[in-house]
Structure formats: C-alpha cells, structure tokens
Amino acid sequence: MYMIAITDPFFYLCAIPAVLIVGMSKGGFGGGLALVGVPMMSLAIPPVQAAGILLPILLVMDIVGLLSYRAIFCRKTLAILLPAGLLGTLIGYFTAAYISETFILLLTGTIAIIFVLDYWFNDKSVRAAKEQNVFLGGFWGTVAGLTSFIAHAGGAPFQMYILPLRLAPPVMAGTAVTFFAVVNFSKILPYFALGQFDVTNLASSLVLLPFAPLATLAGVKIAKHINVGLFYKITYAGLFVISLKLIWDGLVALV
C-alpha cells in the first residue's frame, strides 16, 4: 500500500508555519502558542484530521524538548497536573464519538481567542507567586488533557494554573515539556483506536516531520537569547484572526 500525503499546496502553506510555531513554542519560545497548530491547519483541512497529522510531529518535538530540559521541572506541579491531565485524555477518548466537528471548531476557536485576549488585556504587573492548589490544579489539568486530546490545545488551561506560580522560566518550560510529553504519548493508542492514523495522515506527518526537531531546537536557543516581544505581537494577532475564522465557520455550520 502506497502512502499518499496531502497534495493541496494551501495545506502546506498553513501547515509548515504551524509546525514551526508549535516547535518553537515546545522549545520554550512562545509559551502556550503550541495551540496555534490545529487552528492554522484547520484553515485547509478538518480539525480532527489536523489533530491526527500533528500528533506524530508533537511526539518528535516532545523528545527533543525532554532532551533539552533534562530533569528541569517542578515535581510538585507535575504531581498535581499529570494525573488530572491523563484523566482529561480519557474523557476525550470516551466522548470523541459524541463530539461533532462543529463543536471542535467552536471550542478550538474559543479557547484560542480567550488565550489571546488574556494576553492582551490581563494585568502583567508583578504579583506574588501563588501556592500550589490541588483543586485548581486538578481542574485545569483535566481541562488541559481534554482540550489537548481533542485539538492539541491544552496550552491555555495549563498556563492558567502554572503562570500564577511564577516558576523560574527554565523550570516552567521544562515542566510544560514534561507534562505534554506524557499527555501526548498517552494519546497514541486512543488515536489509533479512533482511526486518526490513516495512511494519508501518516504520510502527511512524515512530509512535515523534518521541520519538527529544527523548530524545537530553534525555540530552545531563541528563548535563551532573543527578546520575543515582536514575535508575540505578530503571532498573537495572527492567532486572533484564525480564532475568529474558526468560530465563524462553526457558527455557519450551526445554521
């Protein structure tokens, strides 16, 4: 059986920048912008298919990220978030048959736009670090696992919990890398069971795969040496436009 990748040039026009942004984010440059992947790719293909194509690429990025942030993470934070995140992926698997593409469009667009608005309007003044909270961590961890399973969009709920802790930047990045590596690897069997890894999706993943380690390593290096202000402004503005497009498509599908 031949593996035939997607041939539509518009798909790669959307997918290659998406993979580059996701990779740099996974490397610690760009925070929760890994959620931009499915929305950008959903401009060219259905979001469910976009999630299936992106997962193998994310797994490669996770491996590179784990090697780059060896044992640099907050154990207490992971002890709270990881069990909840894995519960969220289970919920995603058992509810997948009942979740429509329209719902995924609306959910992905809404999460992304909330994340952008929070970045633009939230008070960024220095605040005292908050204490670990098992209840809040359990809630946001479960939401992160669920939204990660549905659309690889767990970055926003994950950051809702971890940012107020005010961890040192390398520790926060390493904690995020470790959390999403475990969550993403836990999605392999459920995605197989749901038919996400068909021949076309896997072939398309292979075409995009070379960009994954390069983008992640670039993210690690850039995060340590470059002012990211302009990058944030441009990328968040783009994510805002993409979010509006996804929400619009979801609302039109409801009519």
Image: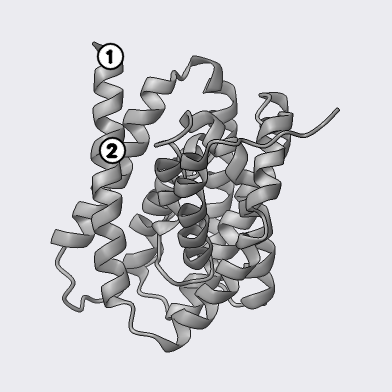
Q: Which residue is mark 2?
A: 110
Mark 2 burial class by Cα count in 10 Å: few <14, some 14-19, many 20+:
some
> Is 247 drawn above or below residue 53 in the view shown?
above
- Where does the image place residue 21, in percent across and percent down from the top left? 45, 61
Amino acid type, callout 2: Thr
Q: Which residue is mark 1?
A: 254
Report the residue that reaches farthest toward the right. Answer: 1
Q: Residue at x 36, y 69 (%)?
A: 165
Amino acid type, callout 1: Leu
- Where does the image place residue 57, in percent across and percent down from the top left? 64, 52
Q: Which corner quadrant of the image does residue 198 belong to? A: top right
Report the residue that reaches farthest toward the bottom. Answer: 225
Q: Is residue 181 left or right of residue 10?
A: right
> Is 21 drawn above or below residue 74 in the view shown?
above
Report the residue that reaches farthest toward the top. Answer: 255
Q: Residue at x 24, y 66 (%)?
A: 233
Q: Which corner quadrant of the image does residue 247 belong to? A: top left
